[in-house]
Image (cartoon, coloured by chain):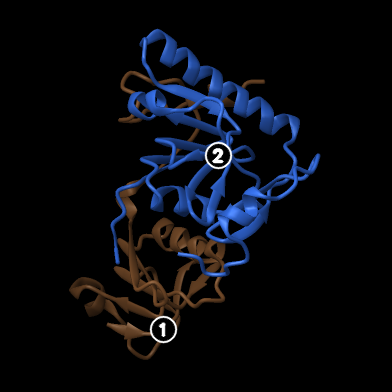
Chain colours: A brown, B blue
Amino acid sequence: MLLDVEFALSEDVRLRPDVCLLLPEKARQLDRKRIPIPGAPDLAIEVISPSERSSESYRKVLSYLKHGVAEVWQIYPESLALEIHKSETRRSLTGDQQVTTDLLPGFSPPLSLFFES
Amino acid sequence: MPTIATMSGAQFDALPYEEGRRWELLEGELIEVPSPTPEHQDIVYAILNALKLYLQEHRSQGAAYADVEFALADHVRLRPDVCVLLAEKARQLDRRRIPIPGAPDLAIEVISPSESLGKIQSYLRHGAAEVWQVYPESRVLEIYKGENGRST
């Protein structure tokens, strides 16, 4: 577990979670003298300050998840709430992939249908 | 969970309607929604059309709408580009009243890069089962499921 250490999640993304957790495999590979740490932590925890815009804090959550963080926890001190975001709850479709959802069984148009004008 | 709370839902509901000005209330934060482009509206129409066709073919009791306002919580008023209400919520719907209380089952936003990502979180936090985010420029659809846990 580390406090306030910077990660290079990709070429153009540098984030410093308030708290992060590296599981044994990543922890073993860690060069303790070098920052930013290349790659993503396994868990990133952000304590949300009252001045932070929800749009900005969620942008960070999405960035963590996109770059391989398994879980992101957001802590809201004022409302004593914890929100847990997991990477498997997010799916990305491109090109001609079929748009499907558990909500609408049998719904399966190709994504490109949405962009035909 | 307002971070910057600038306005309550009641204050928002009392705002005068201003032609050409479109606002939403995101966790107490008043946000301006840009006027839609023709491209944006074409995509919204295509999605709505596909959904309505599906609902018709499956003789489903569900309903799909464009641009209808929801009161997701006291300090949240959001107007998804497209929304789907599944059978149960559609049955309970008062078709003459806005904002619709609660969350849609599916909220779909067609966004430009400048728009707020915070809306996804807000929809899921307040009970939407799924949020679809459509990126017109990259022609990508991102699907977010509301299984994220929250405890207080």
Residue A20 position within the rendered picture, expressed as x and y whole percent measured from the top left: 33, 77
Q: Is A63 displayed left or right of B43 in the figure?
A: left
Residue depth check, mark 2 versus mark 1: number of the one nearer the observer:
2
Residue at 22% across / 79% down in the picture?
A28
The quadrant of the image that shows the N terminus of chain A is bottom left
* Residue occupying the point 75% across, 42% down: B17
Q: Is mark 2 on a helix, strand or loop?
A: loop
- Hey, what amino acid is under mark 2? Pro
Instruction: State the image coordinates of residue A7 (x, y, percent, origin top left).
Output: 43, 75
Q: Which residue lies furthest to the bottom in this view?
A: A33
Quickly name the residue at label 1.
A5
Q: Which of A6 and B34 is in front in this view?
A: B34
Residue A90 screen position, x and y as percent: 37, 47
Question: Disc number at residue B143?
Answer: none
Q: Check disc 2 and report the residue beneath it.
A: B99
Q: What element carries label 1?
A: loop
Question: Which of A48 and B72 lies nearest the eye of the viewer?
Answer: B72
* Relative depth, front residue between B16 and B152: B16
Task: Please indicate whether residue B150 sits to the left or right of residue B27 in the image.
Answer: left
Are there few (<14), some (14-19), or many (20+) residues within 10 Å of tag 2?
Answer: some
3D distance between C-alphas at marks 2 and 1: 44 Å
Residue at 41% across / 60% down in the picture?
Answer: A67
Residue found at x 33% / y 54%: A87
Q: Is residue B25 above or below residue B20?
A: below
Please state the chain letter of the residue tagged with numbered disc 1 in the rendered image: A
- Classify residue A98 by image quadrant: top left
